[in-house]
Image: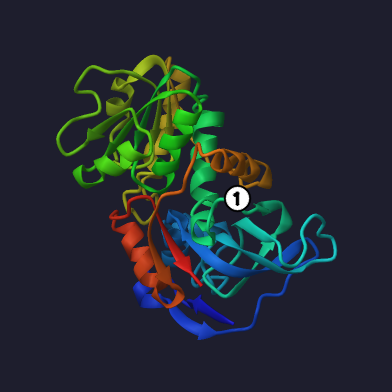
Amino acid sequence: MRAMVQDTYGEAEDVLRLEEIDRPEIGDDEVLLRVHAAGVDRGVWHLTTGLPYPVRFAGYGVRTPRTRVRGREVAGRVEAVGERVTGLRPGDEVFGIGNGTFAEYASARQDLLAPKPTNLTFAQAAAVPVSALTALQGLRDHGRAQPGQKVLVIGASGGVGSFAVQLAKAFGAEVTGVCSTAKTDMVQSIGADHVIDYTRADIADDGQRYDVILDTGGHRSLSHLRHALTHRGTLVIVGSETGGRWLGGTDRQLRALLLSPFVGQKLGTFMAAENAKDLIVLTELIESGAVTPVVDRTYPLHETAAAIRYMTDGRARGKVVVTI
């Protein structure tokens, strides 16, 4: 099969190359997928570059990548199933999280897959798994967003942010999105009640206070974010990398966790729990029309490095997807 492979860490355009390799072998609880599309999320950049350095010590290879093929978000058809797989069979159209999805075939655990939403293309479905799970769990489980609350989504035009705006609206909240001038129309089009152009105004300029802030980008200080929260509000940080080689911006998240017990506001962060149950929740929201993936651009497999660069440069309006 054709796959984008890497043997050393570095920027995608320097280390990724198209190569013919063997199809992946699957375990008893896994399926082999014929990949039709693979989403590009921030985690792809972290694993391609090996940055920040703690990523390498988390089992991905200290000096060189342990696995050669990147990519996790996937949509495709089941090609073969392991002996203990139930509920899936060859030919089923699925989406979810796989291993090495920038390739014609990829393996995936059965508990990280769900039937593809019937109203989505493969490219749209591949945009969902990691980013939408992060937005869903950030708002529902950690932000505890409720009907009638005021929710602020920082980075509302990005992969996680574009889902968060729609999910917050689906939960009955009054939603304000923060983005750049060129993306305000997109954020409005996906349902934001208000949009703040951060090049022209600050999140706290009008004295508005928010019950929940989901911060996916911008590097604002904790004191600045707390000033925009209600006295009992909740801040959930899920992004805003600074590019540092050791902490990569996670120092702000750690400070939030340390400060939270001593203030009335709830300040924190989390790692999304990948599971099929929440993928099915997202499918229901998508098929009902409450949530629609925003796909900015698609790239063919051999241009995967360009897709990753476009995403990391912050130009994307929504998601970037690789099609195979």
Q: Residue furthest left?
A: 200
Relative height, residue 197 to residue 22 (above, below): above
Q: Position of residue 103 (x, y in %)?
A: 55, 74
The answer, for residue 19, to whether it is visible in the render is: yes
Q: Residue furthest right?
A: 83
Relative height, residue 153 to residue 109 (above, below): above
- Viewer-nearest residue: 45 or 49: 45
Residue under the image location 59 percent in, 82 percent down:
1
- For label 1, the SS is loop
- Rate crowding at label 1 as few (under 14), some (14 to 19) or many (20 or more) other CA atoms within 10 Å: many
- Which image quarter: residue 236? top left
The answer, for residue 10, to whether it is visible in the render is: no
Left or right placement of residue 260 versus residue 245 in this view: right
Relative height, residue 105 to residue 136 (above, below): below
Residue under the image location 32 percent in, 18 percent down:
209
Q: Position of residue 56 (x, y in %)?
A: 50, 61
Q: Position of residue 169 (x, y in %)?
A: 44, 29
Left or right placement of residue 250 versus residue 223 in this view: right
Relative height, residue 271 to residue 245 (above, below): above
- Viewer-nearest residue: 268 or 21: 21
Q: Residue furthest bottom?
A: 20
Residue under the image location 56 percent in, 38 percent down:
288
- Which image quarter: residue 297? bottom left
Q: Position of residue 25 (x, y in %)?
A: 71, 74
Q: Give the residue type at disc 1.
A: Pro
Which residue, given by chain and number where applicable, does mark 1 sit on?
117
> In the rendered view, how is the structure colored?
rainbow
Query: How many numbered tags mark residues here?
Result: 1
